[in-house]
Amino acid sequence: MKKTLLTGLALFVMLSASAQKEPVDYVNPFVGTTNYGTTNPGAVCPQGMMSVTPFNVMGNAPENRINKDKQWWSTPYEFNNKYLTGFAHVNLSGVGCPELGSLLLMPTAGELNVNYENYGSVYSQETATPGYYSNKLDKYGIKCELTATPRTSLARFTFPAGQGNLLMNLGEGLTNESGATVRFVNEREIEGSKLVGTFCYVPDAVFPIYFVMRINKVPAERGYWKKMRPMTAEAAWDNTAGKYKLYKSYTKEMSGDDVGAWFTFNTKENEVIEVSVGVSFVSVENARLNLEKEQPFGTTFDKLRADARKRWNDDLSRMTVKGGTDEQKGVFYTAMYHTLIHPNILQDVSGQYPQMEGDKILTTNRNRYTVFSLWDTYRNVHQLMTLVYPERQMDMIHSMMNMYKEHGWFPKWELFGQETLTMEGDPAIPVIVDSWMKGLKDFDINLAYKAMYKSATTQGKDNLMRPDNDDYMAKGYVPMESQFDNSVSHALEYYVADHALSTLAEALGKKEDAKLFYKRSMGYKNYFCKDFGTLRPITKEGKFYEPFDPKQGENFEPSPGFHEGNAWNYTFFIPHDIKGLAKLMGGDKKFVNKLQSVFDRGNYDPTNEPNIAYPYLFSRFKGEEWRTQKLIKELLAKHFTTKPNGIPGNDDTGTMSTWAIFSMLGFYPDCPGVPEYTLTTPTFDEVEIKLDSKYWGKDKLIIKKEGNGDYIKEIKLGGKKYNKYLITHEDLINAGEITFVTTTR
C-alpha cells in the first residue's frame, strides 16, 4: 500500500512537471495584429532575417475589411481579415510605413489560376506559436504550415487528391517598388530577385531581395506568368492584352513588374509538399548558400520547428517570473517576443552584407544588424538589450559604428542598408552613450565621439541628422518655417541627444565640449509659454506662433510644430531636466498638478513615444511617487492584454512592448543616455534576470515583491534599506537583488 502510494505520488509530480509551461508557451503571436499594432503572427527566429507571414491584406473579398490598395496600410496581416493571397517572406513588425512583405507563396488546388483576385481563399483553423504558423485554406482544403530559420523558411502544405498548384507571386507585396526577375534552375527550383524600397516616401531608398525557392517534388508542369500591358492596335494580334499570360514551354529568364512562377502536381489525398525558401540581400548565390547551410539535406519540418521554438525559449528564459496571473505572464513574454524581432541580422552565413548606402559587398565576423527604428527604440529597447542581451547590443553598436565608417553618419532610421531619414532627431547618440556609460565599452569610443560631434556641429545643409542645425546652434531652438512643420519636435530630440553628448564629453575629459552641449540641451526653455503652461512653436520672427491650441494634433491632424502629437504630448518631454521644467512651471506642486491633468483630461497618448515616460516623472518629486505606481498599474491593465488588440497601437519595432516589460519589472530608463532607472511597483512576486557575467560581473539580478499592495512601502537593495526612487545601473547590478515591500495605502 505504501509503495503504491509513493509510486502514484511520484507519477503525479512527474506529470505536473511535464505539464508546466515554459516561457515560450505564454507567447501569443496574434497580439498586436489589429488596432494598428502592425505586428504579424508569422514564423520568425529571434532577430532573424527571414520571417514568413500570412498575407491577407489585398483582394476585393468581402472577408477583408482592410485592403492595402485602398487605404494606408503597413503590415501584411490584419487579424480580422480572412482572405489569404499567399505567404510573404521577410516582413517588418511594428512599423508604420509599408515595406517588404513580398515573395508571395500560395498553394491552390484544381484548375490553375494566377490572378490573386481569384486564387485567394478564406481560411480557418488558424494557430501560431513562436517559430510556427498554421491555417487551413477552406476553398481548397489545404493545410498550411510554416516555420523558419534565421535566413530561410520551410512551408509544409497538405493537399487533397487531384491537381495541386504552387504559385510564387513576385508582382505583389507591401512595397511601393515594382520589378522582379525569376529563372528556373531545374524542375524543382527557381531563383531570382525582386526590387523593394521607397520606405516612408523615400524614392531612392530601394534595394533588391534575392531568393532561391526549392520544392521537394517534381511537378507535372511548370511555367511563368506575366501581367501583360494594355494594348491598343496590337491587341488585334494578342488575346492576352491587359491579362495574365501563362508561359508553359518558355523556361528561360522572366522579368517584369507583375510576374511569377507556377508549378502543378498530381496529388494524392493528404499528400505533403514542402517548399524551402532562402533569401539574401547580397546575391542569389548567397541565398542558395543560406538555404544549403540552414536546411541541409535531410532536414525535416518538425526539426526546424523544434529548433525555432528552442531559440525562442532560450531567449525568453533569460527572464523567469514567479507569481502573477497567466494573463500577466502572457503580456510579459509576448512583449519580450516582439522586442526580439528587430533589429535583425543582415549578413548571410558567409558574413557578407550590403554596404550602408553603397554598392560594395562587405564581410563581417559578427552579427550585422539592420532595421534601426531609432526614434522609437532609443527610448527603451536598447536599454533592455544592454541589460539582458548585452552581447547583441554590443553587436548593434558595432553595426552602427560600421555604418558610420561606410556612410559617414550614424543611422537614424536604417533599413537594409538604406538610410530613410524617417522621423527626427539624432537618436544614435543616446543609444551609444547609454550603453557605454553602463559598461559596454568594447568599441572605439573616440571614433564614436567624432561621429557624434560631427552631427552635432555640422551646418544644416550638409547635415543628414540635423538639417535645421544652423538656427538650432545660433538661437538655441528651431524656428517654425511653415505652419505644419515639426520644428519643436526636432529641437526637443536634439536637446536629448546633446545632453547625452555632454555626459559623454564630460566622461572623456572634454570639459569645454561638455559645457557647450549641456548649454544647448537647456534650449528647451525658449519654447516654454507661461500663458498656456506648455511648449509652443516659435516663428522665424522670434515670436510665439498664433493662433495656438495645445490640443491640436490629438487625432492625427496636422499640428504646428509637433510630429504625431500635440503640445501636451511633448511639453514634459524634457527627461534630462525635469527639475528645471518644474521651476519654469512655477514649482514642484504646480508641475505635479499640471502633469496629473494630462492624465485626468485624456491628453496622455499611450502610443506616442515622447510622452510614454510621463507616468514615471512623478517619482522625481518626494511624496508623489505613489502617482507613478498607480498610473503604471492602470495603464498596463488598460492597454496591454493577450488579445489581438493587446498593444495600444503601433508597436514601433518593440518600443511599446518594451515599455510594458520594464514597467512590469518595476524600473524604467526614463532618461535616454543617463544610466539610471526610475522605480515603481513590480507586477510579479519574483523575477530572475540572467545576467552575462562577462559584462556585468554578476550572473543574475533578482527582483522581489513582498505583499499584495499596489504601492511601495519600502525598498531594499541587496538586503539594505534604499530610500530613493532613482537608481543607477551600477548600483542595481551590484546589489544583485532588489525587494519592493508593498502596501495597500
Image: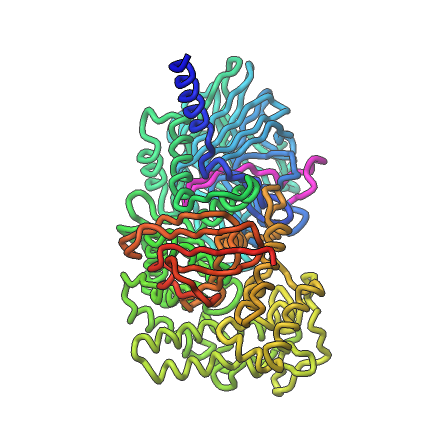
Q: Is residue 684 above or below residue 295?
A: below
Residue at point 48%, 59% (across, down): 667
The rendered magenta stretch, by its main secondary structure, is classed as: loop
Residue 410 in the image: x percent, y percent?
39, 65
Query: Is residue 529 within the magenta segment?
Result: no
Residue 577 in the image: x percent, y percent?
50, 76
Which segment is the magenta one? Answer: 43-67
Q: Residue furthest front?
A: 2
Q: Is residue 325 above or below residue 266?
A: below
Colouring scheme, one of rainbow, by chain, secondary structure, one colour = rainbow
Q: Is residue 238 visible?
A: no
Q: Quadrant of residue 736?
A: bottom left
Q: Is residue 294 visible?
A: yes
Residue at point 42%, 40% (across, down): 45
The quadrant of the image that shows the C terminus is bottom right
Q: Is residue 251 left or right of residue 589?
A: left
Q: Is residue 482 above or below residue 658?
A: below
The quadrant of the image that shows the N terminus is top left
Residue at point 29%, 71% (across, down): 446
Q: Is residue 401 left or right of residue 248?
A: left
Of 596 and 42, the residue lying toward us: 596
Of 82 and 406, the residue lying toward us: 82
Q: Quadrant of residue 326?
A: top right
Q: Is residue 67 left or right of residue 384?
A: right
Residue 127 in the image: x percent, y percent?
55, 31
Residue at point 64%, 78% (across, down): 536
Q: Is residue 126 above or below residue 656?
A: above
Of 529 and 87, the residue lying toward us: 529
